[in-house]
Amino acid sequence: MEKTTEWATALWELKNYLLFLKDSGYSEIPAENIPVEAAEPLPRKAAKEPFEAKKTKPVETPVSAPGPMKERVPEPGAGNAAKLLEEIRREIGDCTRCKLSQGRTNIVFGSGNPNARLVFVGEGPGADEDAQGLPFVGRAGKKLTEIIEKGMGLSRERDTYICNIVKCRPPGNRDPEPDEIAACKPFLIKQLQAINPKVVVALGKPAASTLLERPVPITRERGTWHEFKGTKLMLTFHPAYLLRFYTVENRRNVLEDMKKALSALRDDEPDQGSH
Ligand code: SF4
């Protein structure tokens, strides 16, 4: 067989194999077969393991093996977060406050539990999010769900709220521009005030830079604690970055960052104490 025919056959087989993996539910191919070390277990109550490792899929080692987070009870006077979020969404309306309105299909407001103690902030909707009107539903979204559910042992819907710094898709998935961020940021601030979480996690440089109001070198500052209007703020990589540079080091770093976020949430839980 000629060399070119051999290559064409090999590529065709590789393509079929990748499609087979995709159809089998793989969201990525681990670059190295080295398991991420489990972080030190956090204190937990005896509870069911957060997920059953499926034998057919690559397994992310959980940061810890925490039990389900407690449902958050709104603090007295904190108001009804769900109602406040509805009001903010109404205020946004069919927004044309910035040029991102011109290319969007849907405004992607946010999703999750309005009483969540943990909020993730990304940069902006992509094509899938724009089409569905929901944040983090594409490939990066699946990775984020995996981090939350397999890595942290939490439920995405029950334990977190997820939103972005801009609510409309930047064309070609470029970073949001300063005028667009300036137009949309007030809504993000109102969302965070309504939810009043214990921990906010900024996903990637644009989100971190927007919340901290300075250019954030994310590779240097990820894993460090900051403060956003009185709320603890953790910085980590965007899941899209993690997918692009899927190294053991990056995976370990993100899991370490999430361990810190979990730790802060646990520290903040009311002491159940002994009776
Ligand atoms: S990105 Fe924000 S400010 Fe701009 S049009 Fe969309 S909702 Fe309005």
Image: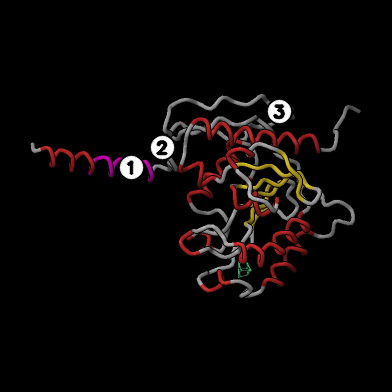
Give the answer, above or below, for where 141 lies relative to 268.
below
Quarter of the displayed picture in which ligand 1 can be seen: bottom right
Number of numbered discs: 3
- Classify 10 Å Cα crowding around label 3: few (below 14), some (14-19), many (20 and above): some
- Please name the amino acid that badge 3 sits on: Leu
- Compared across the picture, whether 114 is left or right of 249 comes to right
What number is the disc on residue 18?
Answer: 1
Alpha carbons under labels 2 and 1: distance apart = 9 Å
Q: Position of residue 132 (x, y in %)?
A: 52, 63
Alpha carbons under labels 3 and 1: distance apart = 37 Å
Q: Position of residue 261 (x, y in %)?
A: 70, 38
Q: Secondary structure at mark 1?
A: helix
Give the answer, above or below, for where 82 lies relative to 139.
below
Residue 16 sits inside the magenta stretch: yes
Q: Position of residue 59 (x, y in %)?
A: 50, 32
- Classify 10 Å Cα crowding around label 1: few (below 14), some (14-19), many (20 and above): some
- Please name the amino acid that badge 1 sits on: Leu
Which residue is pictured at 49% across the width and 34% down the height?
54
Please tell me which of labels 2 and 1 falls first in the chain.
1
- Does mark 2's beta carbon lie closer than 8 Å to ligand 1? no
Q: Position of residue 24 (x, y in %)?
A: 39, 42
Cβ atoms under marks 2 and 1 closer than 8 Å: yes
- Does mark 1's beta carbon lie closer than 8 Å to ligand 1? no
Cβ atoms under marks 3 and 1 closer than 8 Å: no
